[in-house]
Amino acid sequence: MAERDQLVADLTANTKTRAEVLRAVADDSDLVNAEFNRAFVLMQYFGYLRRNPNVAPDADYAGFEFWLTKLNQFGGNFQDAEMVKAFLVSTEYRRRFGTP
């Protein structure tokens, strides 16, 4: 709360620009720790499957939640969780993008 109050004060006093305050919020370690894994899994869907995690063949976020749980179980280490490999060898990826 003190960080927030300081940023508001800096913005009000014009000692920081809106962009600087936004950057400070985006770089905050609490925010990064809270959202990094969710963002990583979402980017797996966007990047490899080129779809949202709640559209066909999924009708809800069950798959997203599965992968997020797996990544969290590995402490955010996507290499040990084999996240990239799992998406690349998935039936959906192989069917949609023609990899043998």
Image (cartoon, rainbow, N blue to C red):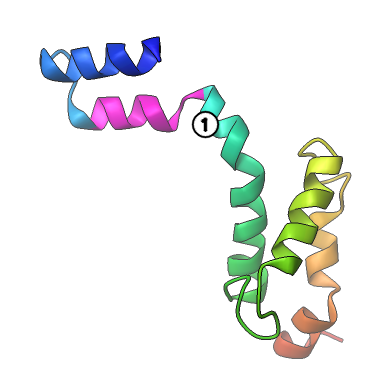
Residue 77's spot in the image, x, y percent?
80, 39
Q: Quadrant of residue 98?
A: bottom right
Residue beneath the point at 89% across and 44% down: 80
Asked if one can make out residue 78 in the rendered structure from this viewpoint, the answer is: no
Residue annotated with mark 1: 31
SS class, disc 1: helix
22 in the magenta segment:
yes
Residue 93's spot in the image, x, y percent?
76, 79
The magenta segment = 19-28
- Mark 1 crowdedness (10 Å alpha carbons): few <14, some 14-19, many ≥20: few
Left-right relation of 13 to 85: left
66 in the magenta segment:
no
Locate the C terminus by quadrant.
Answer: bottom right
Residue beneath the point at 59% across and 75% down: 50
Q: Nearer the viewer, residue 51 or 63?
A: 63
Q: Quadrant of residue 13?
A: top left
Residue 73's spot in the image, x, y percent?
86, 42
Q: Main secondary structure of the magenta part?
A: helix
- In this rendering, the count of numbered labels is 1
Left-right relation of 19 to 93: left
Residue 12's spot in the image, x, y percent?
12, 18
Asked if one can make out residue 84 in the rendered structure from this viewpoint, the answer is: yes
